[in-house]
């Protein structure tokens, strides 16, 4: 999602009545809380999708490093 705010879209969400009542009692903005939760889940899903899509390349790279060593390893200072 970009940093630019997109138009708002009304949406019906079903939540447990006792949770909504407690949220209102505590002054929690349910719309903002839902938005934050959805944003967190979208971020999590994007990260999982990225990993699924890129895992073969990451594994191939790691195998290459195991077989051939790191590029320019001879020029890296040794840490002991």
Image: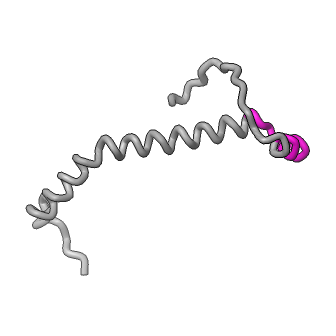
| Residue 13, horizontal then vertical, whole percent | 71, 30
Instruction: Tell me, yes or no, whether the highlighted magenta stretch contains residue 23.
Output: yes
Instruction: Tell me, yes or no, whether the highlighted magenta stretch contains residue 78.
Output: no
Bounds of the magenta segment: 20-31
- Up/down of 24 relative to 59, above or below: above
Front-lying residue, 52 or 28:
52
Residue 22 horizontal side relative to residue 70, left or right:
right
Residue 17 horizontal side relative to residue 12, left or right:
right
| Residue 61, horizontal then vertical, whole percent | 19, 53
| Residue 26, horizontal then vertical, whole percent | 87, 47
Give me the residue at 69% from left, 23% from top: 11
Give me the residue at 59% from left, 38% from top: 39
| Residue 50, horizontal then vertical, whole percent | 37, 41
Quadrant the C terminus occupies? bottom left
Residue 9 horizontal side relative to residue 21, left or right:
left
Front-lying residue, 68 or 50:
50
């Amino acid at each position: 999602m970009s940093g630019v705010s997109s138009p708002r879209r009304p949406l019906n969400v079903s939540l447990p009545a006792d949770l909504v009542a407690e949220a209102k009692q505590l002054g929690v903005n349910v719309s903002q809380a839902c938005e934050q939760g959805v944003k967190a889940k979208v971020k999590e899903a994007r990260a999982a999708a990225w990993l699924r899509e890129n895992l073969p390349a990451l594994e191939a790279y790691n195998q290459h490093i195991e077989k051939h060593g790191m590029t320019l390893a001879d020029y890296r200072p040794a840490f002991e």
